[in-house]
Structure formats: C-alpha cells, structure tokens
Image: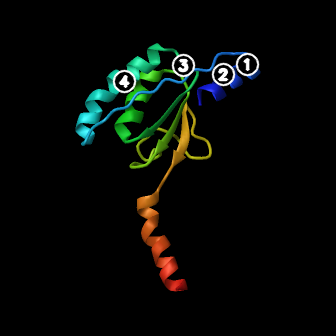
C-alpha cells in the first residue's frame, strides 16, 4: 500500500497522508467519552476531509469539532436524517455527507420477499 501511495503522490504532485483514529468500546457510553478527544485530535491536523464510520457518537463528536471540514460518514446504527446530521440523502447540506445503511429495517422485508419467491 505504501508504494501505491508514493506513486499517487508522484502523479498528483501533492502529498497524500492518511491518519486514523479508533474508538474501541464495548458500549456506546464509553465510545461517547473518547470520541470528542479523538475528533479534536483529528481536527487539529487540519485535514482536507474526514472519513468516518461507526456508531453515532463518532459522527456527533466530529460534527461538533470539525467546523467546516467536510465529513464523509457511513451511518450504520442510526438515521442521520432523523438525528439532524444531514437534511436529506440527495442534498445533505452542511459539511456532512455519506451513506446510510438501513440494514436492520430492510432485512425482514428482504427475507420476506425471498420466502415468497422460494
């Protein structure tokens, strides 16, 4: 992977760096405590964009810390529209965009459809 990044740097003629932070927790309560500190640490690096996935405390902390830095999220356990992180999926507004995986709500419908076909 490092050689691919080096090649990309030569082609783009600008440095490409990737920083990562990981909030490990067995409960959202503990993740919520560590996320603001990790978000602040990332924002201090002044990135061009932040890519984030995981539970809601991650996005909440980034939204509060990032200011105008664009955030690309992958929402897996919450509805970002209902929680007010984005205005809509087609036009999210603000500095947050990304994907919303509604697997929990759609799973019974998908399974029901396969049972009827089988």
- Dot in front, 2 or 4: 2
Mark 2 and mark 4: Cα distance apart in space: 27 Å
Element marked by disc 1? helix
* Labels 3 and 2: the sequence-earlier one: 2
Q: Is residue 115 above or below residue 60?
A: below
Crowd tier of the residue under label 4, counting other residues whose Cα lies within 10 Å: few below 14, some 14–19, many 20 or above = some
* Labels 2 and 4: the sequence-earlier one: 2
Residue visible at 52% across and 15% down?
46
Q: Which residue is mark 2?
A: 6
Q: Are marks 1 and 3 in contact (CB under 8 Å)?
A: no
In the rendering, which numbered label is found on residue 10?
1
- The location of residue 87, given as percent across then percent down, is 53, 41
Question: Viewed as shown, does residue 31 lie left or right of 60?
Answer: left
Q: Which residue is mark 4?
A: 38
In the rendering, which numbered label is found on residue 47?
3
* Labels 1 and 4: the sequence-earlier one: 1
Colour option used: rainbow
Residue visible at 27% across and 38% down?
25
Mark 2 and mark 1: Cα distance apart in space: 6 Å
Place residue 54 in its image quadrant.
Answer: top left
């Amino acid at each position: 992977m490092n050689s691919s990044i080096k090649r990309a740097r030569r082609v783009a003629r600008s440095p490409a760096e990737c920083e990562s932070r990981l909030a490990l927790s067995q409960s959202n309560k503990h993740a919520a405590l560590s996320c603001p500190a990790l978000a602040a640490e990332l924002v201090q690096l002044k990135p061009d964009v932040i890519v984030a996935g995981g539970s809601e405390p991650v996005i909440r902390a980034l939204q509060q810390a990032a200011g105008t830095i664009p955030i690309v999220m992958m929402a897996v356990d919450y509805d970002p529209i209902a929680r007010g992180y984005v205005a809509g999926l087609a036009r999210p507004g603000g500095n947050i965009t990304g994907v919303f995986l509604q697997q929990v709500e759609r799973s019974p419908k998908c399974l029901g459809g396969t049972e009827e076909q089988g």
